[in-house]
Each structure stands twice: as structure tokens, then as C-alpha cells.
């Protein structure tokens, strides 16, 4: 997992809890990296899950609620810290259409060692569509948070119906997504 995701998690904790909580999370997690993350480097996926698990334990938050809240925060962080090209979108639907071919492809161009998920968005109307997600990491709950963060950013609301989930044995996750 790219260091920028860890940087986002640290900022999420500093904004919503405190430096003491972040230090406690690092102490609890027993990390190979020692908890120092550089944006362009790659760290073991297990570290982000260890950090999220100890954070949720400390804050007494169910893990899925914590991951979704983090995803919501992460969208704004990636938009602010990512390449300028991704700031052209006017709404979430326009971004979703190019999430695979432009946004995550850009990540791969800048960081060839990044493992990015696969997304496909097929619009059914101007306000709705079907979103498909595949990743070895199965972070669909983070994807739902990112969708909420994107909708907030473009002053929209989004409702999602998760019709197929990798955690239930499906090959891919699918959602019916509606914006207003
Ligand atoms: C609604 C919008 C977005 C969705 C649903 C989405 C979805 C995801 C998900 C679920 C992951 C977790 C990794 C995985 O599943 O394997 C991820 C990783 C990532 N995304 Fe996105 N993303 C969105 C927008 C963006 C934007 C705007 C950027 C800006 C550059 C971005 C850059 C990244 C990066 C750098 C990673 C980490 C890749 C790695 O660790 O190797 N994403 N994205």
C-alpha cells in the first residue's frame, strides 16, 4: 500500500482525535516500518489494517464504521495531494467514468509498483449507474467511504445498494449508485 494512504490515516487521526491517540495506535500496532511513512514508498498492506484495527479498538468504533469514515476523509486528502489533472471533474459520475482509465492509471504511471484496484462505472441515467470493483484487498467499505467523500466534495448526495460483495463469495463487488 502506498505511503500516501498512511499519511492520510495519520492526518485523519490528528484531525478527528489527537497526536496522543496516533502515538498510542503506533505503539499498539508493532509495525515493521516503525510507523514512519513516505508518500512515494510502498508498505505492507497488513500495516494499514493493524493501524485501523488498533485505532477502532482505542476509539471503541466498529471496524467497518472506522474504515468507511476513513474512506470519506481519504477522498479529499487524495484530491488535495494527487496530480493536478484529477481536479478537472465537475461531479462524482464524471470522475467514476475515468476512475480506472485516468485517475488510478495516473497513480500507476507515477508509482509503477502501486497495486491499484479495478473499477468500472456504467451509467444507466445521468444520476445513476452500476459500479463494479475488484481488488485483492477487498476494501469495498473504504470504496463506499470514498464515494461519500467524492459526493460531499461535489456537493452531491449518494445512495448505494451493494448488490454483490467479494466478502460473500462473489468475484467482484457491485453497487447500484444514485446521485442527487
Ligand atoms: C470515488 C473515487 C475513488 C474510489 C472509489 C477509489 C477507490 C480506491 C480503493 C478502494 C482503494 C484501496 C486499494 C484497493 O482497493 O486495492 C484505492 C487506492 C488508491 N487510490 Fe483510489 N479511489 C478513488 C479516488 C481516487 C483519487 C481521486 C485518487 C487520487 C490520485 C486516488 C488514488 C489512489 C491511491 C494512490 C491509492 C493507493 C494505491 C496503492 O496503495 O497502491 N483514488 N482507491
Image (spheres, helix red, strand yellow):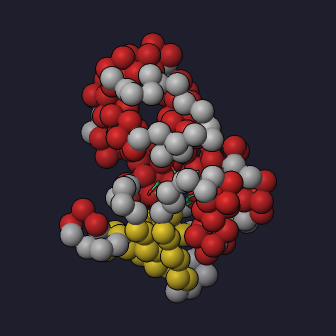
Q: Is residue 101 visible?
A: yes
In the picture as drawn, the residue positioned furthest to the bottom comes out as 124
The residue sitting at 30% across, 74% down in the picture is 171
The residue sitting at 47% across, 24% down in the picture is 35
Does 33 sit left or right of 125 as displayed?
left
The residue sitting at 40% across, 21% down in the picture is 26
Q: Is residue 175 visible?
A: no
In depth, the one of 161 and 54 nearer the eye is 54
Does 87 sit left or right of 128 as displayed?
right
Q: Quadrant of residue 143?
A: bottom left
What x and y, as percent, mark residue 136? 36, 60
Q: Quadrant of residue 139?
A: bottom left
In the picture as drawn, the residue positioned furthest to the front comes out as 113
Q: Quadrant of residue 8?
A: top right
What x and y, as percent, mark residue 107? 63, 57
In the picture as drawn, the residue positioned furthest to the left comes out as 168
In depth, the one of 23 and 72 nearer the eye is 23
Amino acid at each position: 500500500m502506498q505511503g500516501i494512504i498512511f499519511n492520510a490515516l495519520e492526518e485523519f487521526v490528528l484531525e478527528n482525535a489527537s497526536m496522543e491517540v496516533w502515538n498510542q495506535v503506533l505503539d499498539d500496532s508493532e509495525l515493521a516500518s516503525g510507523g514512519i511513512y513516505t508518500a512515494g514508498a510502498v508498505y505492507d498492506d497488513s500495516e494499514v489494517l493493524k493501524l485501523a484495527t488498533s485505532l477502532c479498538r482505542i476509539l471503541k468504533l466498529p471496524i467497518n464504521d472506522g474504515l468507511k469514515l476513513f474512506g470519506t476523509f481519504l477522498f479529499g486528502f487524495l484530491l488535495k495531494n494527487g496530480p493536478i489533472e484529477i481536479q478537472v471533474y465537475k461531479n462524482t459520475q464524471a470522475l467514476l467514468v475515468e476512475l480506472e482509465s485516468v485517475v488510478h492509471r495516473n497513480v500507476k504511471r507515477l508509482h509503477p509498483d502501486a497495486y491499484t484496484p479495478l473499477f468500472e462505472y456504467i451509467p444507466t441515467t445521468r444520476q445513476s449507474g452500476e459500479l463494479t470493483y475488484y481488488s485483492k484487498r477487498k476494501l469495498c467499505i473504504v470504496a463506499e467511504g470514498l464515494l461519500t467523500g467524492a459526493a460531499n466534495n461535489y456537493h452531491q448526495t449518494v445512495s448505494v445498494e451493494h448488490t454483490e460483495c467479494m466478502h460473500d463469495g462473489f468475484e467482484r463487488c457491485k453497487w447500484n449508485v444514485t446521485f442527487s
